[in-house]
Image: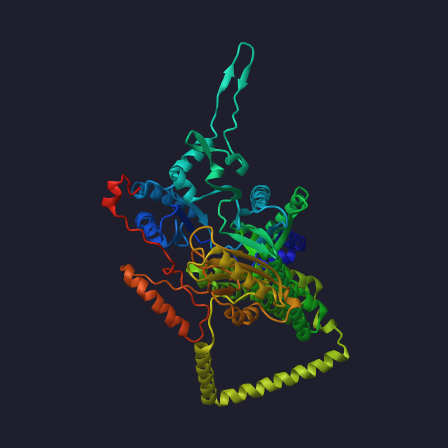
Amino acid sequence: MSFSALFIKRPVMTTIVMGGILVFGVMAYRLLRVSDLPNVDFPTISVSASLPGASPETMASSVATPLEKEFSTIAGVDTMSSSNALGSSQITLQFVLDRDIDAAAQDVQAAIARANRQLPQNLPYPPTYQKVNPADQPVIYLVLTSPTLPPWVLDEYGETTIAQRISTLSGVAQVMVYGSQKYAVRVQLDPRALAVRGIGINDVSQAVQDANVNLPNGVLYGPDKAFTLQADGQLTSADSYRPIIVSYCDGKPVRLDQLGRVTDSVENNKVAAWFGDNRGILLAIQRQPGANTVEVTKRVRDLLRALEAHLPAAVHLDVLFDRSQSIRESVSDVRATLLVTLCLVVLVIFLFLRNLSATVIPSLAMPMSIVGTFAVMYLLGYSLDNLSLMALTLSVGFVVDDAIVMLENIVRHMEMGERPRDAALAGSREIGFTILSMTLSLAAVFIPVLFLGGIVGRLFREFAVVIGLAVLISGFISLTLTPMLSSRFLRPPAEVTHHRLYAVSERMFAALLDAYRRGLRWALGHRRTMMAATAAITAVTVALFAVIPKGFIPSQDIDMLFGQTEAVEGISFDALVRHQKAVAAVIRADPDVEALLSSAGARTGAGNLGRVWIRLKPRAGRAATADQVIDRLRPKFAQIPGIRVYLQSPPAIQVGGRMTSSQYQLTLQGPDTDELYRSVPQLEARLRGAPGLVDVTSDLRLSNPQVNVRIQRDQASSVGVSAT
């Protein structure tokens, strides 16, 4: 007995099996996570170290170099790059794709411990590391603004009330804060006031430290009660610092406010962000690898509705950008394409078979195969994304072939006078092995894709598995459900009555068949001509393949633009703010821009940089694409003197350990630092003159103004002043 005969003779069992596939497939479809692309985890670790006041050269030689020597001994390091700025170093380690990120993190921690003996002793804290995924862009951006509250109060609401609550949500990896302004008391001393009283800056620093302490004070035990001691040693405002006694001059106390200004301020007053005309901070939320983007953003929005009730009326919380909206639209478009494809295939089958029951039977193989694929996708941890849905769309044409071949052979036996049941048994027995070989050979076509390495292999592995699964499941459906339905619902051709439309279409198909027959005879009679035409088509195909533009992933229009601004090195913060506001004014004047967040200054490193986050109007409400908006704004930015703007549409996948100002990155390296410094400007100038390249920039910044202090050590020693 053949495999199909078991299902033909047991229709109830066949119905239950198909019902199980349908139920589990629908349940899995509801549980599948939604994303734009398959999950690609780049094992990347970022190491940060800080030494306030140290020059970039000092950071590179005394901090980055010892760490890099230890990191180079770790197995599986693919690329290692370091960026050194004023007072900070950041080293990015990217491992091969098959390296376990947790094991790599342990190796990095051990390497940092080994390098600690070689690092400067005055580091404020040991180097820290964190696991990052550069391929994962933030899924939602939140903006917190207030027209009346000071920046540090707004920052407290953002980092404490909102960011910490969001970090506890399932699926949230981390919340990055841009433009944060932590509270601090700022003391600006007057050198003349210090000199008149003979007080050094170190004396002021020591006095402030001695007056501001937060230590345990102990317990007083009495015969009947015990009292916990609580002293107000911690100072929390500028008013508390002003009366601090620094020293005594002529028997009179010299207080801190007599030596300069003491104000309520922030830790870093060289960083600012604006949303519209108000100061604000940006919260960028990243999801955990494998988490459902749509579900994560939904949880965040639900939490925001609850948090808004606890925020004061002066604090405004806005969503700058929601990545899930473009993902929903993209996936919805692919779903619609899939449904249209299903309908078109059914119509084509009906057009040629011209029999309703004969059309329904093979058509059922398509939804059953696709729904069954959803169940296996859930078991494998896959997602509903553009590539997996594209694989299902392409498989529609494949999954129906087996069912049509099975149906055609059963109909052939019925035309020979056999009853439907006997025709189904005989036809399925004859064609079963053929369908099995067709299914396996078609699925085997995609096996080489599974062995692709690198990023391409990670992206298209899910595509190959999904389309292969759909083909295999369609083969099972064609060997089970199709013959069973044929034995129950197909009628012999002699019992089928045809309408006038059938006769008209039959003459049309007969004419097509006759035209094909004549064309085939001509082709067989002119073999050399056909071979020459084939060779010509092949040559044209190769030529077109050579000249057609090539790329990794097409640029996506997700209604968002990200940009970095770069002013001249050494610019003051006030001047940078003026330039940044001029850039923001140009962006807001564009008719396709809906919202803008602009920030000036960097938390660490170069102080001539800024950033812009632009939310465009929905695609249906604007005529220009995201790339066209960039091309339209670029000449306007060129008219703003003293600052450059580098806009880009965020790529679907960020390849590399860190984000740069432009779409492509080129690394120049060499053992001679001086030669490297001379070569970088020359290469940058050559690239700027190359046709087809725009937004060429470099992260090598050596023209920042500086003051060199040459210590006369003999004279310093004679007056008792050390280099320290």
Report x, y in % for residue 127: 38, 44
Kindly identify the residue that appears in the image at 53 percent across and 64 percent down: 649
How is this picture coloured?
Answer: rainbow
Q: Is residue 415 above or below residue 156?
A: below
Report x, y in % for residue 549: 47, 74
Kindly identify the residue that appears in the image at 30 percent across and 49 percent down: 69
Report x, y in % for residue 151: 57, 47
Residue lying furthest top: 223
Q: Is residue 374 visible?
A: yes
Report x, y in % for residue 722: 28, 41
Q: Is residue 197 above or below residue 395?
A: above
In this orientation, which residue lies closer to the viewer: 163 or 553? 163
In this orientation, which residue lies closer to the viewer: 158 or 622? 158
Residue 326's image quarter? bottom right
Kindly identify the residue that appears in the image at 34 percent across and 44 percent down: 111
In this orientation, which residue lies closer to the viewer: 64 or 93? 64
In the visual, does 711 lie left or right of 96?
left
